Image (spheres, grey):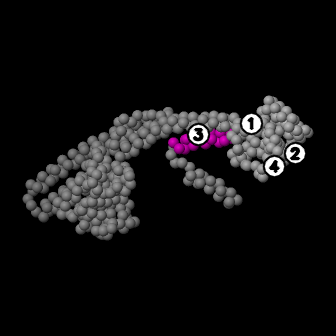
Amino acid sequence: MALPRLRIRLWPRLFKRWAPTSLFTRSLLIIILPVAIMQVAVTWAFFEAHWQTVTSQLSEDLASDIAWDVAAYQEAPTPANLRRLADRAERTQSLSLALQPGRQLPAAAPKNRGLPAFDLALRNALDDRMTEDFWVDSTRYPNFIDVRVAVAGGVLRIIAPRDRAFAERGHVFVMWLAGATFLLTSVAILFIRNQVRAIERLAAAAEAFGRGVDAPSFKPHGAREVRQAAEAFIAMKTRIQRHIEQRTALLASVSHDLRTPLTRLKLEAALAPESPRMTAIQNDLSEMEYMIDEFLAFARGEGGEVVEHRALAPFLTVLADDAARGGSRVTVSAPDGLTVAIRPNAMRRALSNLIANAAAHGATVAVEALRTAPTKVEIRIDDDGPGIAPENYEEAFKPFSRLDESRNQNAKGVGLGLAISRDIARSHGGDLTLEKSPLGGLRAVVKLPG
């Protein structure tokens, strides 16, 4: 019982492996495959039940006429009788009779490779009606059949029109069938393509919205169900944008409310007499201000910024110069002309976080941008620091995560840099991953659609 179950489970897997993946191809296959099967069945039934039957009947009629002419000549093999039979055959049977004295039948008849069944029908009909040896050639002349019969004194040659033995109009039926199939396929392609295009527009609008790019020209198109999905997407998009706007306004208000007492505290601390305790208080206030900035940046994001096409080489060079002013040594490698669609401020914040993180843990930082596929770009930030264990790569992206001491000597950090950078990369339709660096430390890879 295990073997049949295995076969039942295997068939769906094989079908999924070989089945087309696109909706357009699958829909077209659903329409075309049954039509093709029906056309093949109809064509087979036509040839089997009609064409061959008609051809067999025609072959039998021609064989009967030839057998009668041969028998009539055999009864009186004289030139006068041959002339009379030839005249009668030409007038009433559309046959041409001629005697080839002293001849013999050819050794073997050529085979009709195109329609062998029709040759076989004529040979069988002649064999049933005559006892004499005969030879049939249906390939030498395009419109005639050459039949030769061994008679007394030589060979009687009969030339018959091809349509007397074969049904020659069958190809017209096949052409009509092929034309109808072509017309139906063309209509199906146009119709399905129009429906699939509406789904592609919806997918493109959803992908653009995921990258933060607005598509104001998008409108529902296509079938009713597709339009319903598009309208639901527009409604969802509106709700998400309204939520983002409300959250941004709320966070701006919270930022203002938090900064007001913080500013008063910093002012009072600055006016107070200097002492070790006051210095500690000022340091705590500075750290609190930094932490508030980090929390708000993580919660607010950069969703409202406009997407622009930027060349990566000068963009990364500016970031490297900023890091160099802080004492870091950063090298940049990017091909000229490599551009990506980004929100500049957001991407600047993400890459600055990664470069600062690499500079804080390594003496050497290398930034490289390259195109890895026709529509994919990678920005790699390498350092020669202590690195992170591979099993902790995902843990490093969790907000407020602080890893082992080898990678966390920077007391100023609050564990949000990598989380913010990954969130920004994903908001662009890409991702941020970590891996072992060729320099010996950590490599951060920002993957963006190109």
For label 1, the residue is 161
Residue 273 position within the rendered picture, expressed as x and y whole percent measured from the top left? 8, 59
Residue at the extreme top:
91
Closer to the chain start, of discs 3 and 4, is: 3
Q: Which residue is mark 2?
A: 152
Cα gap from disc 4 to disc 1, whole angstroms? 23 Å
N-terminal of the pair, mark 4 or mark 2, is 4
**Vertically, is 424 above or below 63?**
below
State the image quarter where residue 443 is shown.
bottom left
Q: Are marks 2 and 1 in contact (CB under 8 Å)?
A: no
Q: Residue 2 vs residue 32: left or right?
A: right
Query: Residue at horizontal 42%, vertical 39%?
Result: 201
Q: Amino acid at mark 3?
A: Ile
Q: How many other residues sit within 10 Å of disc 1, few (<14), some (14-19) or many (≥20)?
A: some
Give residue 104's mark.
4
Q: Which mark is residue 31?
A: 3
SS at mark 4? loop
Report if residue 258 is visible in the image: yes
Category of crowding for the residue at label 3, using alpha-carbon neighbours closer than 10 angstroms: few (below 14), some (14–19), many (at least 20): some
Q: Is residue 57 magenta?
A: no
Which of 426 and 297 lies nearest the eye of the viewer? 426
